[in-house]
Image (cartoon, helix red, strand yellow):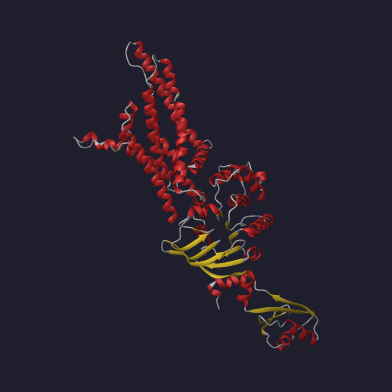
Amino acid sequence: MIKVSGLTKDYGARRAIQNLNFDAQQGEIVGFLGPNGAGKTTTMRILTGYMPPTDGEAIVAGYDVVEESLEVRRRVGYLPETVPLYNDMVVFDYLKYMGELRHIPNVDDRVEEVLDMVGLMDRASGYVGNLSKGMRQRVGLAQALLHRPEVLILDEPTIGLDPGQVVEVRELIREIGKERTVLLSTHLLYEAQNLCDRVLIINKGKIVAEDTTENLQARLLGAERVVVRVRGEADELADTVKKVKGVQRVETHEDGAVEFEFSSGKDLRPEVAKQVIKDGYDLLELRPLGMSLEEIFLELTDDSRKK
Amino acid sequence: MRNIWTIAKREYENYFNSPLAYVVAFAILLPSGIYFSLILLSSAQSAFMGGGGAPDGTPTNWLFVFLMVFLSPALTMRLLSDEARMGTLELMLTAPIRDFELVAGKWLGAMMFVLSIALVTLIFPIILENLVTPGIDWKLMIASYIGLILVCAAMLALGVGISALFTNQFAAYFVTLGLFFFLWFMISLPVQFLQSGGEFLNYLSLSYHFAQNINNGSMTLAGITYYLSLTALGLFIGTTAIEIRRWR
């Protein structure tokens, strides 16, 4: 549904994105993750036919974004990052106008339908300019959904929404993502982890990692870290843990808990548990410390942290 | 075509939300009304003294077009520059419409607004028709209105084209005004100073074809071609400017 190969875009002398390659299938939600200025918006603007790439090729919904731009634009729903809207229009009229430009039959009914989907029915007759940030966001989303697009491209779709709305919008995106292709950018790692089937991490115009969220964690971790906690004083707990063969990098926390690592693949937790009990401790907790996407993200994008 | 119409309709309706558009309409209709009354008065006076011809409606159309030199840039200045400033251009450029359709739609919307004002001025020839026996020369009047439409089409197209070059509407206004000022007053100035050979400059003047020919009932091919070419040029500049924005 989206196929990008060798995509490059220069703004004057500055290279915004460099040789991007990725794809997204129907029924898939792909997250686009990266720090500000990494090239997320640039990529999305190319995919929506807003501007042509300097080099490379992008096929969206079966059409080339440069050669068959109009066909692509017919099939793509786009929520730009800045959510540009006509402030001097009434919400309903605005959506109707956008629907008429897309030749939607029975446009009035469809506008009501999408307004209902984004929960803005009660603001339909108000001016766009009077809406709050979160409501604007939802009008933008309604506009992107209006023509039942095959591909939905959302630039920071949940930014500025309050927590309740965030949940609703995520639910909506998840629903749409079942049948269609969704590419969304976010800087909320939690969101990517929660919502996306696959994550592309982009930094300085290059894709630095691409995988499912689970695989990404496992792959980057290489080893699994586990924390052990016991009841009462446990000055020698670290020594106990060290007795188990294969345990590496044992560290003692200030509160007495002990953290250790083993190569992924061979789980040493049962052995550690046995050893702890054998040495007379009351085992309270044996918890794996999954590396959060946050840490992965920093690991990948922050040069100064690279080992 | 359908997209052009959709965009034109929105722009047209949008004018009625804008105080500026009312100011423009007022600034055309008030002087036109005063001018028309003065024409009636002076004709009546001449007739009373036993001389003078029957008045016709063409001078008010000349005034209309003359005022458009200053006022039409105000109608077109924000059409595309504001879309760029507000970011809504991104919506338009990712909607399934051609760049030309966007520019032409904006122009048509402005055109429809100006035609609405022109429609109000039809009251002048209708009043005259009832005052003058055996009625006024309607052929001349129709030629005058066709000329008015042609000149406005050219001005608004150039205005829309220039608006596409800017993100600041006032920059668009002053550049458009400067261009019209040049094309209306200055381009044919050398004709008066040169002994001969400068006449072709008349053909490039925004006012010449209308004031000298069309508004006197002579629909010259040169005049029609000139205004239609300027219209096409304006729309072309607008479309190209939008395309350049995409590539930047």
Q: Please, is residue A153 above or below residue A272 in the view?
A: above
Q: Please, is residue B36 above or below residue A98 in the view?
A: above
Of residue A118 and residue A11, the one placed in the foreground of this image is A118
Of residue A1 and residue A6, the one placed in the foreground of this image is A1
Residue B43 on image: x %, y % = 36, 16
Residue A206 on image: x %, y % = 50, 68
The structure residue drawn at horizontal position 72% and vertical position 89%, both measured from the top left corner, is: A243
Count of labels in the image: 0
Of residue B183 and residue B138, the one placed in the foreground of this image is B138
Of residue B228 and residue A283, the one placed in the foreground of this image is B228
Residue lying furthest front? A62
The structure residue drawn at horizontal position 65% and vertical position 65%, both measured from the top left corner, is: A190
Q: Please, is residue A186 above or below residue B216 in the view?
A: below
Quadrant of the image containing the N terminus of chain A = bottom right
Residue A138 on image: x %, y % = 62, 51
Q: Please, is residue A226 above or below residue A165 in the view?
A: below
Query: Is residue B200 at all visible to an observer of this figure?
Result: yes
Query: Is residue A279 at all visible to an observer of this figure?
Result: no
Residue B107 on image: x %, y % = 44, 40
Quadrant of the image containing the C terminus of chain A = bottom right
Q: Examine the image and state in which quarter residue A88 appears.
A: top right
